[in-house]
Image (tube, rainbow, N blue to C red):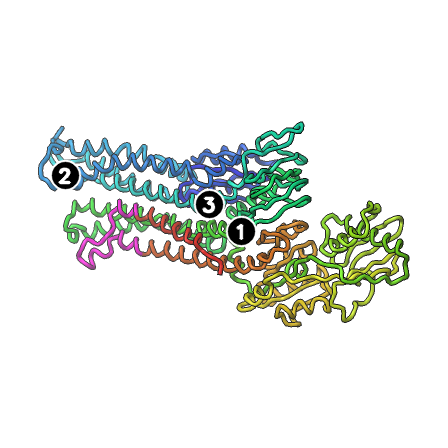
Amino acid sequence: ERVLFVVQGMDCAGCAASVDAVVKRIPGVASNTVNYTTCQLTVDYEGHLLSGAALQKAIEAAGYKCSVATESQEEMLRSLGKADEVKEFQRNFFFSLVLSIPVIFISTILPLFGKNGLQFEITPRLFLFDLVLLILTTPLQFYCARRFYQFTWSALRRFETNADTLITLGMSVSYLYSIFAMATAKPHKRPETLFETSAELVTFVLFGRWLEASATGSTTEAMAALVKLAPDTAVVVRNEREVTVPVDALTVGDIIVLHPGTIVPADAIVISGQGDFDESMLTGESIPRPKQKDDLVVAGTRNLNGSIVCKVKFAGQMTQLQQIIKLVSDAQTGEKANVQSLADRVAAIFTPCVVILSLITFIAWYVMDPTRYLHKSRGHFYDSLRFAIAVIVASCPCALVVATPAAVMVGTGKAASLGILIKGAPVLEHMTQVTDIIFDKTRTLTTGEFTLSEAKFITPMSQVEQLELWRAVAAAESASGAVHPLGAAILAHVAKLSSETLPMVQEFEYLPGRGIACKIQDRLLKVGNHLLLGLPAIEGNTDTNVLVSVDSQHVLSIGLKDQLRPGAQQVVAKLQEARQVWILTGDEEACAAPIAKSLGISPDHLYAQCSLQDKARFVTDLQAQGRRCLMMGDGVNDCLALSEAHVAVSMHGPGTQVAVDSADVVILGQDADSAILVKLVHALALAEATLARIKLNLVLAFGWNLLALPLAMGLLVPITGAAVYLPPGLAGGLMAMSCVGIITSSLMLQRWQPP
């Protein structure tokens, strides 16, 4: 069973790793994925061993707020925008700022003016100066920074460490040391404390986390835009009156009215009226689409003009819009890319290594005596401890962990806005490795809108007999459910010949790569290619041929012509600049060769008369040679090849659901849309741009740690003889800002434009 949770409190990538570790240890969990940027946790579990309530309880025991995700648009938008986290960090930051400003002023600026009233000695070991700092710093520690303590304690109970462990350790050491210094102070001598270090650290880290949560929310803008497409209400016809109802109340068969400017609430069939519809948010195409009777309008599109009456075909989670949202969500919460897994493994061992390095730093400086190098030294032990704390807080691995998912989130969101659905981070990686692109021909390189060019009756028939045969062929094609493009052309032709009801079909059978067979009026009818009828291929014919037999006797040959998609030549030429391009088709070579020639594809890269198994075998054999294949197809006869390919690409449209299920990349658009092939070029270019951004993010993340650690350790102080180092407060702030920098770098992908 599968359950989707919304987990609140994951304020950094390290928290997501902690949640992941908690869930993995629960008996009965098969697999899980955590997405820090969307606050979502998907868990697959054994229903007989575990329940959703038990999972929720285990996550909440780890210190996180957890709830089962609902279909509520408002809740999803709040989760995507991280509204609760942003609000909490903002509130805590400003409260900490109010407290930390006087702490820093009293600690660092006020002493410059000589003796003052705060140096009043309350007791021989307690000064008003220190008491005021303690009073101001304590709420900073235990109110503003309470979530860091909560998550650190939850991790320690599981014998783990996380990013919050480093921050909590830095804050706690400076705070507790200050109290210890006050308690052990010599009479009449004010102790050296680190209250300002603790205050600076809390304030800077909260400021960074606030910016990080805000920036992370921005990475989900494309997803949020899709969610916002769904309207809250719909106008339905009830008892011959128009009534406004919540969109959740719609059911299949309801009659809805779409007035000008209305957003379509469900997938529906037009039953009266006509108008133009803006589908740009779903397909990326800016040109409105005209709709009239019997056309499908989809949820989330907008009626620009004309009042239209429709009948609901799919509602709720079954609409194309909700399916697209699910595909995008799965892509952003799914399997990790190899580069992300590497970063996670590094981050997992990073925290204990940093703690050890901090101890080494403290011991080294204590032995070397920092008072010899620092002009404004505040004591041997004090300065050594400050260096150790700076190492701890400067080295949080959050930037490293967030480097890949942030870029994947923005990249897949950008793709969705262009009408390209990419199912996960590994797919982006695989797309950059493609060496060969394999196209199915019909409805992929061509429009799939066939027209009948020839009909040759093999045996003499009267006009009545010919019409009866045509109607029988049309009945067989209609019985297939998802009508093949060739069948659609035949149905259109028969509709012109007769409007009578088609005969009843019995014992229907679909034969992939060959055709269909059935019984009509107790006679065996076969409609398909020459392989189905056991005949030789027709030589020298450039049409696509459909052959018909009755009781195993060949009676009719039908010739059909197809057209190239507009822009196909330019797309193939662009792809051939860096990759090999192939065509696989079930058509005869004589029919497919002119198409290949017009596209600039050589005859040795065309494979005709391919069955479903032949296509899959070709892909497998090519990849066995070390090639990386991208297969693009649209129908049932491509599903095996799509499942074998390194990257599978399909188009989302009528009759393509099996291909969509097998695909890694789904391209949205009208079936005859010329932009579909162009979007493949865009998808490949965007994948390369996203992977380049991931690598840049990782370089920046590693670069920050390589730069910050030596400065925090004070390695340059003995070399330069100057105070060139990172104080703990500044180190903590810059650490948080490094995450903001990584997320900002990822957000630059939103400005990417197709070549």
Of 190 and 10, the residue lying toward us: 10
**Residue type at numbered disc 1:** Ser
**Residue name at image x 9 percent, y 36 percent:** 115
Q: Are marks 3 and 2 in contact (CB under 8 Å)?
A: no
| Residue 715 part of the magenta-drawn span | yes
Q: Which residue is mark 1?
A: 286
User: Can residue 161 be seen in this snapshot?
Assistant: no
Could you say where residue 197 lies in the image, as x and y percent from the top left?
24, 42
Image position of 552 (left or right of 714) = right
Query: For this view, does 42 lie left or right of residue 705?
Result: right
Numbered tag placed on residue 220 in the rendering? 3
Q: Amino acid at mark 3?
A: Thr
Position of residue 598 measured from the top left corner of the image (x, y, whole percent): 64, 69
Q: Earlier in the sequence, mark 3 or mark 2?
A: 2
Instruction: Name the residue located 83 percent from the left edge and 48 percent from the top edge.
Output: 507
Q: Position of residue 635 (x, y in %)?
A: 68, 54
Residues in magenta, as a range: 707-733
Q: Position of residue 146 (x, y in %)?
A: 34, 34
Residues at discs 3 and 1 in contact (Cβ within 8 Å): no
Compared with 114, 664 (above or below) is below
**Where 283 falls versus 460 (above or below)?**
above
Residue 313 placement: quadrant:
top right
The residue located at (18%, 39%) in the rendering is 107
- Between 528 and 205, the one lying in front of the other is 528
Q: Earlier in the sequence, mark 1 or mark 2?
A: 2
